Amino acid sequence: MRYNLPVLVIHGGAGSWQIADQDKAKLTISEALERGYYEFRKGSALEAVVEAIYYMEESGVFDAGKGSVRNSAGYIEMDAGIMIGNTLQAGGIMGLREGSAIKKAFEILLQNRHVLMIGSGDNTSNNNKNVISESKVSGDTIGAVALDQHGNLVAGTSTGGIKGKLPGRVGDSPIPGAGYYATPNVAVSSTGVGEIILRMLPAKEVDILVSLGFTIDDALRAVINKITKIFGKDNIGMIGLDKYGNASAYYNTKGMARGVISSDGVKKVYVFEGEI
Protein backbone atom coordinates (compact mmCIF):
# COMPACT_ATOMS: atom_id res chain seq x y z
CA MET A 1 0.00 0.00 0.00
CA ARG A 2 1.22 3.49 -0.77
CA TYR A 3 1.56 6.12 1.95
CA ASN A 4 2.34 9.83 1.98
CA LEU A 5 5.82 10.74 3.15
CA PRO A 6 7.26 10.43 5.71
CA VAL A 7 6.64 6.72 6.35
CA LEU A 8 7.93 4.40 9.07
CA VAL A 9 7.43 0.62 9.10
CA ILE A 10 8.68 -1.57 11.96
CA HIS A 11 8.60 -5.21 13.04
CA GLY A 12 9.07 -7.16 16.26
CA GLY A 13 10.01 -10.46 14.72
CA ALA A 14 8.44 -13.32 12.81
CA GLY A 15 7.89 -16.56 14.71
CA SER A 16 5.54 -18.77 16.67
CA TRP A 17 3.57 -15.91 18.16
CA GLN A 18 0.98 -16.78 20.79
CA ILE A 19 -2.39 -15.03 20.97
CA ALA A 20 -1.75 -14.21 24.63
CA ASP A 21 1.37 -12.23 23.69
CA GLN A 22 -0.15 -10.03 21.01
CA ASP A 23 -1.54 -7.25 23.23
CA LYS A 24 1.82 -6.45 24.81
CA ALA A 25 3.56 -6.69 21.44
CA LYS A 26 1.02 -4.44 19.70
CA LEU A 27 1.21 -1.86 22.47
CA THR A 28 5.01 -1.74 22.22
CA ILE A 29 4.95 -1.59 18.42
CA SER A 30 2.42 1.25 18.58
CA GLU A 31 4.56 3.31 20.96
CA ALA A 32 7.72 2.59 18.96
CA LEU A 33 5.97 3.92 15.84
CA GLU A 34 5.08 7.13 17.66
CA ARG A 35 8.59 7.55 19.05
CA GLY A 36 10.17 6.97 15.68
CA TYR A 37 7.73 9.15 13.78
CA TYR A 38 8.41 12.06 16.14
CA GLU A 39 12.02 12.05 14.94
CA PHE A 40 10.90 13.03 11.44
CA ARG A 41 10.02 16.45 12.87
CA LYS A 42 13.58 17.24 13.87
CA GLY A 43 15.64 14.73 11.91
CA SER A 44 15.45 12.29 9.05
CA ALA A 45 14.62 8.67 8.29
CA LEU A 46 17.91 7.76 9.96
CA GLU A 47 16.89 9.13 13.35
CA ALA A 48 13.39 7.66 12.98
CA VAL A 49 14.75 4.15 12.46
CA VAL A 50 17.24 4.41 15.32
CA GLU A 51 14.67 5.73 17.79
CA ALA A 52 12.00 3.16 16.89
CA ILE A 53 14.43 0.27 17.24
CA TYR A 54 15.97 1.69 20.42
CA TYR A 55 12.55 1.91 22.05
CA MET A 56 11.88 -1.73 21.21
CA GLU A 57 15.33 -2.71 22.55
CA GLU A 58 14.62 -0.95 25.83
CA SER A 59 11.11 -2.43 26.17
CA GLY A 60 12.37 -5.92 26.93
CA VAL A 61 9.44 -7.34 24.98
CA PHE A 62 11.39 -8.64 21.99
CA ASP A 63 14.61 -10.60 21.46
CA ALA A 64 16.81 -7.51 21.30
CA GLY A 65 18.32 -5.10 23.81
CA LYS A 66 16.96 -5.77 27.28
CA GLY A 67 14.92 -8.72 26.04
CA SER A 68 17.91 -10.47 24.45
CA VAL A 69 18.21 -14.21 24.97
CA ARG A 70 21.37 -15.72 26.43
CA ASN A 71 23.85 -17.95 24.67
CA SER A 72 25.00 -21.41 25.80
CA ALA A 73 27.55 -19.82 28.14
CA GLY A 74 24.86 -17.76 29.89
CA TYR A 75 25.54 -14.26 28.59
CA ILE A 76 24.12 -12.15 25.77
CA GLU A 77 25.70 -11.16 22.48
CA MET A 78 23.71 -8.60 20.51
CA ASP A 79 23.99 -7.80 16.81
CA ALA A 80 22.61 -4.86 14.82
CA GLY A 81 23.01 -3.05 11.53
CA ILE A 82 21.77 0.12 9.85
CA MET A 83 22.09 1.49 6.31
CA ILE A 84 21.32 4.70 4.41
CA GLY A 85 20.05 3.96 0.92
CA ASN A 86 20.97 7.20 -0.83
CA THR A 87 24.64 7.03 0.17
CA LEU A 88 24.98 3.26 0.76
CA GLN A 89 26.61 4.01 4.11
CA ALA A 90 26.25 1.13 6.57
CA GLY A 91 27.26 0.29 10.10
CA GLY A 92 27.05 -3.05 11.89
CA ILE A 93 27.99 -4.38 15.32
CA MET A 94 28.48 -8.04 16.28
CA GLY A 95 28.60 -9.64 19.71
CA LEU A 96 27.89 -6.52 21.77
CA ARG A 97 27.47 -7.41 25.44
CA GLU A 98 26.16 -4.18 26.89
CA GLY A 99 24.38 -1.03 25.82
CA SER A 100 22.27 -0.50 22.71
CA ALA A 101 23.23 -2.48 19.62
CA ILE A 102 21.38 -0.16 17.23
CA LYS A 103 23.00 2.94 18.71
CA LYS A 104 26.41 1.32 18.44
CA ALA A 105 25.73 0.43 14.80
CA PHE A 106 24.56 4.03 14.26
CA GLU A 107 27.82 5.29 15.74
CA ILE A 108 29.84 3.07 13.38
CA LEU A 109 27.80 4.32 10.42
CA LEU A 110 28.38 7.97 11.34
CA GLN A 111 32.14 7.40 11.70
CA ASN A 112 32.05 6.13 8.09
CA ARG A 113 35.37 4.34 8.47
CA HIS A 114 34.31 0.70 8.72
CA VAL A 115 31.10 -1.22 8.07
CA LEU A 116 31.33 -4.07 10.60
CA MET A 117 32.85 -4.10 14.07
CA ILE A 118 33.07 -6.71 16.82
CA GLY A 119 31.43 -5.66 20.09
CA SER A 120 33.47 -4.14 22.89
CA GLY A 121 33.03 -4.64 26.61
CA ASP A 122 34.05 -7.01 29.37
CA ASN A 123 35.01 -10.18 27.54
CA THR A 124 35.13 -12.27 30.71
CA SER A 125 31.81 -11.35 32.24
CA ASN A 126 28.89 -13.75 31.95
CA ASN A 127 26.35 -11.10 32.81
CA ASN A 128 25.00 -7.97 31.22
CA LYS A 129 23.90 -5.37 33.73
CA ASN A 130 21.70 -3.66 31.16
CA VAL A 131 19.58 -6.75 30.55
CA ILE A 132 16.75 -7.23 33.04
CA SER A 133 15.54 -10.57 31.72
CA GLU A 134 14.97 -12.44 28.52
CA SER A 135 11.86 -11.64 26.53
CA LYS A 136 8.91 -13.65 27.79
CA VAL A 137 6.83 -13.32 24.62
CA SER A 138 7.22 -14.94 21.22
CA GLY A 139 9.10 -12.02 19.69
CA ASP A 140 12.24 -12.28 17.64
CA THR A 141 14.62 -9.86 15.92
CA ILE A 142 13.35 -6.28 15.59
CA GLY A 143 13.73 -3.87 12.70
CA ALA A 144 12.56 -0.71 10.97
CA VAL A 145 12.54 0.93 7.54
CA ALA A 146 11.76 4.58 6.87
CA LEU A 147 11.39 7.12 4.07
CA ASP A 148 11.53 10.83 4.87
CA GLN A 149 10.29 13.86 2.92
CA HIS A 150 13.72 14.33 1.35
CA GLY A 151 13.55 10.87 -0.22
CA ASN A 152 16.05 9.23 2.13
CA LEU A 153 15.49 5.48 2.64
CA VAL A 154 16.95 3.82 5.74
CA ALA A 155 16.84 0.26 7.07
CA GLY A 156 17.92 -1.12 10.44
CA THR A 157 17.76 -4.41 12.37
CA SER A 158 18.69 -5.45 15.93
CA THR A 159 18.70 -8.82 17.70
CA GLY A 160 19.79 -10.90 20.67
CA GLY A 161 20.23 -13.90 18.39
CA ILE A 162 19.14 -17.48 19.00
CA LYS A 163 18.71 -18.78 22.54
CA GLY A 164 21.48 -21.20 23.49
CA LYS A 165 23.68 -20.23 20.53
CA LEU A 166 27.40 -20.92 20.75
CA PRO A 167 29.45 -17.95 22.01
CA GLY A 168 30.65 -15.93 19.04
CA ARG A 169 27.79 -16.94 16.75
CA VAL A 170 26.74 -14.14 14.40
CA GLY A 171 23.42 -14.16 12.56
CA ASP A 172 22.08 -12.11 9.70
CA SER A 173 21.12 -8.91 11.55
CA PRO A 174 24.43 -6.99 11.23
CA ILE A 175 25.09 -8.12 7.65
CA PRO A 176 24.05 -5.81 4.76
CA GLY A 177 21.96 -7.65 2.21
CA ALA A 178 20.89 -10.27 4.73
CA GLY A 179 19.31 -8.81 7.86
CA TYR A 180 18.86 -5.36 6.35
CA TYR A 181 19.53 -3.43 3.18
CA ALA A 182 18.86 0.03 1.77
CA THR A 183 19.45 1.59 -1.65
CA PRO A 184 17.96 4.63 -3.40
CA ASN A 185 15.12 2.31 -4.46
CA VAL A 186 14.21 0.26 -1.40
CA ALA A 187 14.74 -0.38 2.32
CA VAL A 188 14.28 -3.85 3.81
CA SER A 189 14.56 -5.47 7.27
CA SER A 190 14.56 -9.24 7.79
CA THR A 191 13.75 -11.50 10.74
CA GLY A 192 13.93 -15.25 11.16
CA VAL A 193 16.53 -18.02 11.13
CA GLY A 194 19.85 -16.27 10.63
CA GLU A 195 21.67 -19.25 9.18
CA ILE A 196 19.12 -19.46 6.36
CA ILE A 197 18.96 -15.72 5.79
CA LEU A 198 22.76 -15.50 5.57
CA ARG A 199 22.83 -18.11 2.83
CA MET A 200 20.04 -16.50 0.80
CA LEU A 201 20.68 -12.74 1.23
CA PRO A 202 16.95 -12.00 0.87
CA ALA A 203 17.17 -8.26 1.54
CA LYS A 204 19.52 -7.87 -1.42
CA GLU A 205 17.30 -10.07 -3.57
CA VAL A 206 14.35 -7.78 -2.84
CA ASP A 207 16.42 -4.80 -3.95
CA ILE A 208 17.30 -6.56 -7.21
CA LEU A 209 13.69 -7.41 -7.96
CA VAL A 210 12.47 -3.88 -7.21
CA SER A 211 15.24 -2.50 -9.44
CA LEU A 212 13.92 -4.76 -12.22
CA GLY A 213 10.44 -3.29 -11.89
CA PHE A 214 8.72 -5.59 -9.39
CA THR A 215 6.53 -3.94 -6.77
CA ILE A 216 7.77 -4.11 -3.20
CA ASP A 217 4.86 -6.40 -2.35
CA ASP A 218 5.60 -8.83 -5.17
CA ALA A 219 9.34 -8.74 -4.45
CA LEU A 220 8.88 -9.67 -0.77
CA ARG A 221 6.46 -12.46 -1.63
CA ALA A 222 8.71 -13.85 -4.36
CA VAL A 223 11.79 -13.96 -2.13
CA ILE A 224 10.01 -15.48 0.86
CA ASN A 225 8.21 -18.01 -1.33
CA LYS A 226 11.59 -18.98 -2.77
CA ILE A 227 12.99 -19.55 0.73
CA THR A 228 9.89 -21.51 1.72
CA LYS A 229 10.29 -23.75 -1.32
CA ILE A 230 13.90 -24.52 -0.42
CA PHE A 231 13.84 -24.61 3.39
CA GLY A 232 10.17 -25.01 4.31
CA LYS A 233 8.06 -22.72 6.47
CA ASP A 234 8.58 -20.97 9.82
CA ASN A 235 11.91 -19.33 9.12
CA ILE A 236 11.55 -15.75 7.77
CA GLY A 237 9.61 -12.52 7.70
CA MET A 238 10.42 -9.19 6.02
CA ILE A 239 9.24 -5.61 5.85
CA GLY A 240 9.98 -3.35 2.90
CA LEU A 241 9.50 0.21 1.70
CA ASP A 242 10.22 1.70 -1.71
CA LYS A 243 11.14 5.22 -2.80
CA TYR A 244 7.52 6.07 -3.60
CA GLY A 245 6.20 5.24 -0.14
CA ASN A 246 4.86 1.79 -1.02
CA ALA A 247 5.14 -0.42 2.07
CA SER A 248 4.68 -4.14 2.55
CA ALA A 249 5.27 -7.00 4.99
CA TYR A 250 5.30 -10.73 4.40
CA TYR A 251 6.23 -13.83 6.42
CA ASN A 252 6.00 -17.63 6.37
CA THR A 253 5.61 -18.02 10.13
CA LYS A 254 2.56 -18.08 12.41
CA GLY A 255 2.76 -14.34 12.90
CA MET A 256 4.96 -11.25 12.79
CA ALA A 257 4.54 -8.20 15.00
CA ARG A 258 4.55 -5.21 12.67
CA GLY A 259 3.20 -1.73 12.12
CA VAL A 260 3.22 1.34 9.90
CA ILE A 261 2.71 5.07 10.48
CA SER A 262 2.68 7.91 7.95
CA SER A 263 1.70 11.52 7.35
CA ASP A 264 -1.67 10.31 6.07
CA GLY A 265 -2.65 9.99 9.73
CA VAL A 266 -2.60 6.22 9.25
CA LYS A 267 -1.27 3.93 11.96
CA LYS A 268 -1.68 0.16 11.68
CA VAL A 269 -0.39 -2.50 14.07
CA TYR A 270 -0.73 -6.28 13.62
CA VAL A 271 0.66 -9.56 14.86
CA PHE A 272 -1.42 -11.96 12.82
CA GLU A 273 -3.75 -11.01 9.94
CA GLY A 274 -3.60 -7.51 8.50
CA GLU A 275 -2.13 -5.71 5.49
CA ILE A 276 0.59 -3.10 5.87
Image (cartoon, rainbow, N blue to C red):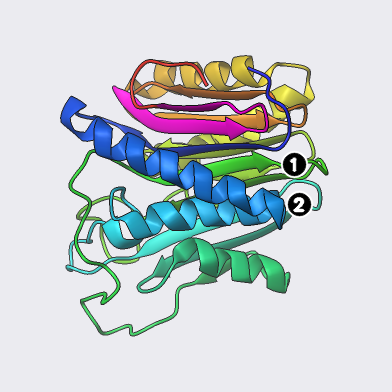
Question: What whole-number distance in Å separates the C-alpha atoms at marks 1 and 2?
Answer: 6 Å
Percent x, y for residue 230?
42, 21
Amino acid type at image mark 1: Thr
| Number of marks in the rendered image | 2
In what element is the residue under mark 2?
A: loop
Residue 254, picture quadrant: top left
The question of residue 260 being in magenta is answered with: yes
Query: In the picture, which quadrant includes the N terminus?
Result: top right
Q: Residue at x 47, y 32 (%)?
A: 259
Answer left or right for 2 relative to 236: right
The structure residue drawn at horizontal position 33% and vertical position 55%, both measured from the top left corner, is 59
Q: Which amino acid type corresponds to the residue marked 2 in the rendered image?
A: Leu
Q: Which residue is mark 2?
A: 88
Nearest the viewer among 234 and 101 is 101
Residue 137, x across and y down, in percent? 21, 42
Residue 73 image-quadrant placement: bottom left
